[in-house]
Amino acid sequence: MTPSTPLARRSKTLSASLGLGEKLFASSEERRFADAIEQGLEKVEAGLLREVSFADDMADVTSRYLLEAGGKRIRPVLTLLTAQLGDGAIDDVITAAQAIEITHLASLYHDDVMDEAEMRRGVPSAQSVWGNSVAILTGDLLFARASKLVASLGERSIKLQADTFERLCLGQLHETLGPRPDDDAVEHYLQVLADKTGSLIAAAAQMGVIFSNACDEYAEPVVAFGEKIGVAFQLVDDVIDLSEPDAETGKPQGTDLRSGVATLPLLYLRREAMTDADAAALLLRIEQSVNGADDESDPVLEAEFAAAVAELRAHPVTERTYDEARRWASDAVAALDTLPAGPVKKALTKFAEAVVDRSR
């Protein structure tokens, strides 16, 4: 089966990638800054299409599948953004941005197998089209391509990629196994988010500093920013998962719950259920409806599942999750204190605000 997906579905605007409005870049200097990143992103995109192409027909189709399905390219944009602290989008920065995005793309193929996801970026997931083995091998091929790009940048890049890949794997492993009996479930979950999402966003920001020849002292704040904003991003996703589906997310309401993922609202509810009878009753209804939701063809079970999701969405634990996301985003911005004032710091700060505003 060879599914057809539209080419070049990536948004071509910085505002779409980072959630930034045009008013942010009001001065002529800031507009030149934004234009430089847009031009760099065009080079990244052209390179992505080249780097995920294979002479083998089947590998070429499967590897290009999710790239051509779309994506905001947040990670390469962050690489290009932080590169403006140095020499800008020079060739090594473009290569680094491509490697980061291909690494992210590879992880999506593997994630969808682990999560048994049916959809990704508005199209059927690779594993639902070709099966688990093909999806896993496609992810492996893409990791190999990313590694070749990274190797061309030298030893420092290789080590950074290896450390990041290790954290991606550990995050998935810990999510799969779950917390040990003596672990705090919330702390365990937050560490999983830091490893699975924060680590790659942090690496994207760090590569922009390294390969633009920016001051080494800028690396630490952008790494801290990337890790923290990655956690905030996923926590907001936990809230969005409980919201009515819309054109932006494309995910049905309660997708993570249906898949058995214990997101932060559910973890908070489990805590409350230990001492609160109402919370315990809601938790029971959620667990019963999730078990019944396996049969999506039964309208009664689906209605019960939708009602349980709506109850959880309205419960204070969901607002607490949003507050936690806002705290992580605030900490991310605070990490930028030592960066010089200017369009880079301004854009990163606004991006943090845009991340938490997605659920509103």
Image: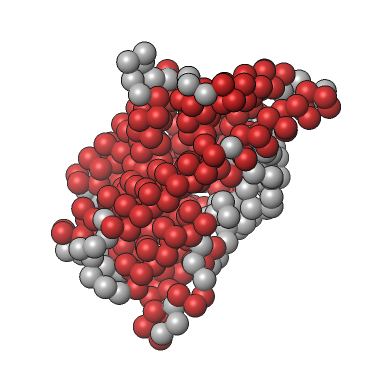
- Name the outermost residue toward the top: 181
Q: Quadrant of residue 34?
A: bottom left
Residue 20 place in picture, x, y as percent: 49, 67
Residue 133 place in picture, x, y as percent: 55, 22
Is 9 in front, or is 238?
Answer: 238
Q: Residue at x 26, y 56 (%)?
A: 335
Residue 106 can be seen, yes or no: yes
Q: Residue at x 61, y 39 (%)?
A: 313
Is 102 in front, or is 345?
Answer: 345
Residue 46 place in picture, x, y as percent: 49, 59
Quick check: 352 above or below 101? Answer: below
Which of the image's four quarters has the C terminus?
A: bottom right
Q: Quadrant of residue 198?
A: top left
- Name the outermost residue toward the bottom: 28
Quick check: 289 above or below 158? Answer: above
Q: Residue at x 26, y 73 (%)?
A: 341
Which of the image's four quarters has the N terminus?
A: top right
Residue 150 place in picture, x, y as percent: 31, 46
**Image side of residue 286 versus residue 137, left or right:** right
Residue 55 can be seen, yes or no: no
Q: Residue at x 45, y 75 (%)?
A: 24
